[in-house]
Structure formats: C-alpha cells, structure tokens
C-alpha cells in the first residue's frame, strides 16, 4: 500500500495481444524501397552535369550501332553497363563482353576534357579484346541563316 498508493496499474489498459501485420508491411515497404531506389539506374554514380561530348560536324551521319557503351569522365572515371570500373577492371570487362557477340563494337563516350592518352589506352585495350571502337561526338551546332549575317 505504501509503495503504490494510487493503484495506477489496475487502471491501465492491458497490453495489445500479438504484434500485428503492420510491422511486416513496413519491412516489406523498406525492402521494396531499397530494391527500386538501390538499383544501378537510380542511385549508382553516373555521368555528372559537366559531361559534354566533343562536337563534330557530321557526327550523326557517321553513327553506327554499338554492342557496348562506356562513358569516360574528365576525372578518369570509367562507367560501363555494370558500373564504375578502373583501367584493370575495364580490360577484364572488355574480355568478358567480347565473347558475347560475333562482331563486338564499343562506343566510347568520352567527356570533352578526357586526354588523348587515356583514349588511346582504352582504345588499345578494346582492340586487344577484339572490339571495333567508335568514338561518340555530338553534332556541331550549325549557325542559323540569321546568325550568318
């Protein structure tokens, strides 16, 4: 009586029976969230806003279908369809991809700040793996007749 003078424990509601399905729904929604937003298409590192292809007149007329595409950034990062790779991993990736097609073609999307030495190294690795190499370029903007005057 002295320890519990107001007898509050007898006036409380009993604890709920069972855990309920809401916890399982929350876990399922979290799993769905990470499955959707954790894909390499949404949260994986990608090409930044500063990525610009070099411009070349007639670039669209020389376009061809490629079996594989890589993107090379000015910072030296190389992105394949499987994600970010370094130079050694790129060689392995190229060798594994070359056997999947009878005439493999690699399109290199190099940012305008990528050095020629890096491009030649990547192109050499692609040729060693058996790829035909194409370099991506944006069509050069032609001035309108109004701007020519």
Image (spheres, rainbow, N blue to C red):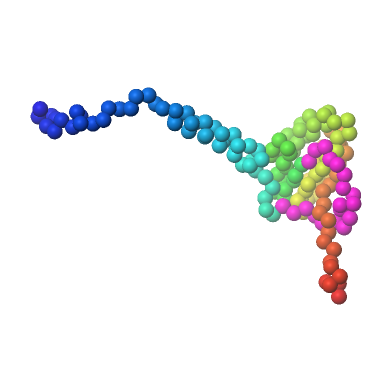
Q: In which quarter of the image is the N terminus?
A: top left
Residue 28 lies, with reference to residue 109, above or below; the image says: above
Which quarter of the figure has residue 65?
Answer: top right
Q: Residue furthest left?
A: 2
Q: Which residue lies furthest to the bottom in this view?
A: 149
Residue 147 lies, with reference to residue 130, above or below; the image says: below
Q: Is residue 102 left or right of residue 70?
A: right
Which quarter of the figure has residue 96?
Answer: top right
Q: In this view, does 43 lie to the left or right of 93?
A: left
Q: Which residue shows up at 9% across the image and 29% down it?
A: 2
Q: From this viewpoint, is residue 95 visible?
A: no
Q: Quadrant of the C terminus?
A: bottom right
Q: Which residue shows up at 77% across the image and 42% down it?
A: 70
Q: Give the range drawn in magenta.
A: 51-69
Q: Does the magenta stretch include residue 91?
A: no
Q: Which residue shows up at 84% across the image and 72% down it?
A: 146
Q: Return the x and y of residue 147 as percentages of the image width and height.
A: 83, 71
Instruction: Using the image as rendered, state which of residue 56 and residue 91 is in the foreground.
Output: 56
Magenta highlight: main SS: loop
Q: How many labels does the image show?
A: 0
Instruction: Using the image as rendered, state which of residue 23 and residue 82 is in the foreground.
Output: 23
Instruction: Using the image as rendered, state which of residue 147 and residue 105 is in the foreground.
Output: 147
Q: Which residue shows up at 88% across the image and 39% down it?
A: 132
Q: Return the x and y of residue 16 as percentages of the image width and height.
A: 33, 27
Q: Is residue 65 magenta?
A: yes
Q: Return the x and y of residue 120 as percentages of the image width and height.
A: 83, 44
Q: From this viewpoint, is residue 84 visible?
A: yes
Q: In this view, does 6 lie to the left or right of 77?
A: left
Q: Return the x and y of residue 24 as percentages of the image width and height.
A: 47, 28
Which quarter of the figure has residue 68?
Answer: top right
């Amino acid at each position: 009586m002295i320890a519990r003078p107001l007898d509050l424990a007898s006036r409380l509601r009993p604890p709920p029976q069972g855990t309920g399905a809401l916890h399982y729904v929350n876990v399922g929604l979290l799993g769905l969230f990470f499955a959707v937003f954790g894909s390499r298409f949404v949260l994986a590192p990608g090409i930044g806003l500063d990525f610009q292809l070099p411009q070349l007149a007639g670039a669209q007329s020389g376009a061809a279908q490629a079996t594989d595409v890589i993107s090379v950034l000015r910072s030296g990062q190389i992105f394949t369809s499987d994600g970010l790779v370094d130079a050694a991993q790129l060689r392995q990736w190229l060798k594994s991809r070359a056997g999947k097609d009878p005439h493999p073609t690699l399109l290199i999307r190099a940012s305008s700040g990528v050095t020629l030495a890096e491009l030649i190294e990547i192109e050499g690795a692609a040729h060693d793996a058996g790829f035909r190499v194409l370099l991506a370029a944006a069509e050069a903007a032609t001035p309108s007749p109004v701007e020519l005057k």
